[in-house]
Amino acid sequence: MTLFELVKQNICVPDAAKHYGLQVNRNGMCSCPFHEDQHPSMKLNERYFYCFGCGATGDVIDLVARLFDLSSYEAAQKLAQDFGIDPDKPPAAIALPKPERPLLKAYRQEEVRCLRVLCDYLHLLESWKVQYAPKTPEDVLDDRFVEACQMLDYVEYLADLLIAAELDAALNEYAGLREQAQSVDPVQLYEARQAIRPGKEQEAENRAQRAYGEKYSPLLMFDSKKAVFRMLHKDMERQAVRRIISQYQREQQISSHKRKSKGQER
């Protein structure tokens, strides 16, 4: 096991962030150290970090490399030294199976249910704020209008937190599936993903439209797609697949040329 693999397997992003002085709240958010951040905009999950403000993203090694202006290898060495990881003597915990967490699935399901309830309440408050707004300064304020004014920003904030948590869960699941797919032919895997991608993207857009209602913005959805694309390192993956295909095509051309040459010699 390489130094990089040891570090990533034994040190999660939130632990490293806290160790190096970042203030991480209970929702896994912190102020981004890579731009002037007035409010916490960086999301930290087990394997990745992502800033909704400046777009900075990466794993635990990338985080430390950017924090201390180090190369990836120097950052991995620093993490190993600071967290007591010896590359020659991997911790015994690496060989242990990951503990099952039966409550985690139920917790995620409850998060989704809460998000739906909050979105329904948010849409109701938005309609109350318009429908029951006073027409003149002399009108008596309707209780529903008052409630909408008092609760709208707070409910929107809670919904954003749950959406960030849902993104966190999706990224963790993606990282696990990506590890399982290491033995699969990358070209076949890429082609299979491209085949199901349009349907999945449309499903995600429909969910976003239902959640945000009139506030749904196609432009914002497009920007979000690009952000997720960067977060999952799709550019690197696409380039790698293209290199493999190009190499295969070159090999086929060389093989075809050799067969033709042998045929002419005969």
Image: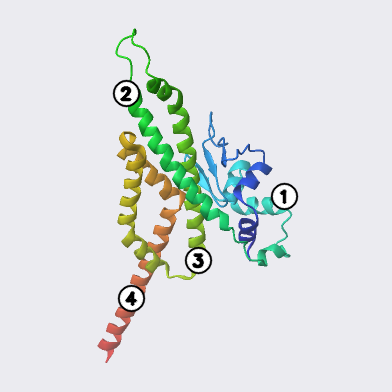
The amino acid beneath tag 1 is: Asp
Name which of mark 3 and mark 2 comes first in the sequence. Answer: 2
Q: Residues within 10 Å of mark 4 (few under 14, many from 20)?
A: few
Q: Is residue 48 left or right of residue 188?
A: right
The amino acid beneath tag 3 is: Gln
> Where is mark 2, residue-wise?
130
> Where is mark 1, residue-wise?
82
Location of residue 118 with respect to 207 vertically, above or below: above
The numbered disc on residue 252 is: 4
* Rendering coords of residue 26 (x, y %): 60, 40
Instruction: State the count of labels.
Output: 4
Secondary structure beneath dot 2 equals helix
Secondary structure beneath dot 3 equals helix
Q: Is residue 154 left or right of residue 256?
A: right
Cα separation between marks 3 and 2: 50 Å
Cα separation between marks 1 and 2: 55 Å
> Residue at the location (26% across, 88% down)?
263
